[in-house]
Amino acid sequence: MAGFSSTIGRKYAMALSAMFLLIFLLMHLSTNMLSVISPSAFNAASTFMGYNPLIQFAMQPILGFAVIFHFIMGFILELKNHRARPVKYDVNGAAANSSWVSRNMIISGLVILAFLGLHMYDFWVHEITYKYIEGIAPDDTRFWGELHEKFANPIRVAIYVIAFVLLGLHLAHGFQSSFQSIGARHPKYTPIIMAIGKWYAILIPLGFIFIAVYHFVTQ
């Protein structure tokens, strides 16, 4: 396998990190959807994840590393691709050979990264403050109320909706691209991968948007 010093190696590593994040998004959506179905079930799931040492001190750092690694690899590959072009594509030529999404993955990625900063501030920083700075005793009934309160602000809800629309666009290209980067290009499987990627890019962001809007309209 090519190393990180080669473009192929970087693409392969970025694809693997993307697949890890695709699995995480599905799990994250499943957990958060409980907040719509059953507040008590959401509180139970959140308590388990929030106070489980394996998740907090092993899985959470791995997730953080995967996110940072994925974005760094994306920036490096985009920079190298840009430098490798002898001349810049004209607008018509670029549009004819690729989609707007594929040409602007770096832009959607930067917006998503900025959104992750807000998301971390809303939830991760709050958890660190609650558990380790203020040292408040565990309360397994607090999670649903805290989530519900976050979406009382229409501006925050709008930011979340816009971010997840861009995430959907990012996923629309990134899902298939990840499988191609690891060599999954067989004519028999490519249409299946494309179909799954299309529905994933629609349903996952739509699920998160639904959760945000649901909590806003049920205040």
Image (cartoon, rainbow, N blue to C red):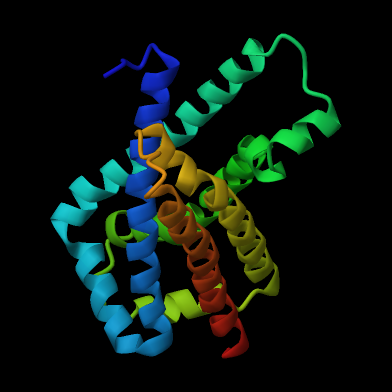
Horizontal side, residue 73 vs residue 81: left or right: left
Residue at 76% x, 31% y: name it.
Answer: 94
Image coordinates of residue 32 in percent, x first then y, are 39, 73
Image coordinates of residue 148 in percent, x first then y, are 49, 80
Q: Compare residues 14 and 163 and report the one nearer the observer.
A: 14
Q: Which picture quadrant has residue 14? A: top left
Q: Compare residues 87 and 32 and report the one nearer the observer.
A: 87
Image coordinates of residue 29 in percent, x first then y, are 40, 68
Residue 176, compared with residue 71, is above or below; it is: below
Residue 206, compared with residue 102, is above or below; it is: below
Q: In which quarter of the image is the C terminus?
A: bottom right
Residue 59, compared with residue 209, is above or below; it is: above
Q: Compare residues 71 and 190 and report the one nearer the observer.
A: 190
Residue 157, compared with residue 201, is above or below; it is: below
Residue placed farthest to the front in the image? 188
Image coordinates of residue 177 in percent, x first then y, are 48, 40
Residue at 63% x, 66% y: name it.
Answer: 161
Q: Which picture quadrant has residue 44? A: bottom left
Horizontal side, residue 77 vs residue 192: left or right: right
Residue at 28% x, 55% y: name it.
Answer: 132
